[in-house]
Image: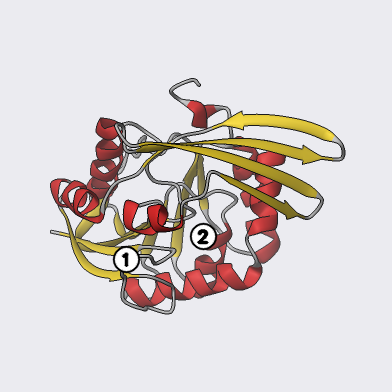
Amino acid sequence: MQTNWWENFFYGVALDFWRAAISDEQTRAEADFINNQMQLPVGAKLLDVPCGNGRLSIELGAFGFELTGVDIAMEFIEEAKRNSRARGVSIDWRNSEMRALPWTNEFDGAFCFGNSFGYLDDDENADFLAAVSRTLKPGARFILDAPAIAECLLPHFVEQRIIELNGITATIDTRYDHEQSRMFPNFTFVQDGVEDKRSSSQRIYTYKELSGLLSSAGLEIVGAYGSVDEEPFKLGAHRLLLVARKV
């Protein structure tokens, strides 16, 4: 499997599957969580990275925030542009790799959702958090959606899952490498009788390791939740939502 698998993964059927997996209700609930945790006035500037098809940026833009969305998938960026125009929301969309963040002390808050963290190697993951931190004003908050940490993933780990959504069947065969602390999901998508195989990988940090990475980037954890309902995080939760503050 190529090291930079994410450069050629997010197009076509993979994006169709992602769209089908996320409901409007989930988007609204996540946007409400972000809004509540940011503690910011209308007009504040937020960075969404990576933003995917812009679902959260558009929802938060409708709240009155000023959004910038960054994503490597051109197909998603073009969709985000269409959807934001349809909602009458003005957002700055950037087609770029998630570490390529040219701003300094620009944003009042930032967030990374959609299980988008950990695709890179250790140094590159640290580079991403440092890049986000640089974009933030002192005291600004960063919210990281990290459902693939060890305390979430390993208690529920299965080697194969088969998911059917909106006419797409996805068979996901996953290998966990304990020496690398990394999982390697191999996806087989079937849509309209056409089979499409794609490979991926993701670093599985422990809570302590991830806390250390954030701290090294100048981000201090101020909250850890197991759901958008703000339930406290605990071992075996299916999700970790970390709220950090730039120090």
- Image location of residue 37, percent across then percent down: 34, 74
24 relative to 218 in the view: left or right: right
204 relative to 51 in the view: left or right: left
Q: Residue 82: tell me if it is visible.
A: no
Number of residues whose C-alpha sits closer than 10 Å to that of mark 2, classed few (under 14), some (14–19) or many (20 or more): many
- Image location of residue 205, percent across then percent down: 29, 46
Name the amino acid type tagged 2. Ser
What residue is shown at x 68% (from left), y 36% (from top)?
A: 188
- Image location of residue 218, percent across then percent down: 15, 51
| Residue occupying the far right of the picture | 192
What residue is shown at x 37% (from left), y 37% (from top)?
A: 182
In the rendered image, the vertical position of residue 37 relative to residue 88, given as above or below: below
Query: Which residue in the structure is indicated by mark 1?
Result: 235
> Dot 1: what SS?
loop
In terms of depth relative to the viewer, which is nearer, 21 or 193? 193
Query: Which residue in the structure is indicated by mark 2?
Result: 57
Mark 1 or 2, closer to the camera: 1
What residue is shown at x 39% (from left), y 67% (from top)?
A: 237
- Residues at marks 1 and 2, CA–CA distance in whole angstroms: 30 Å
**Residue 146: mark in rendering:** none
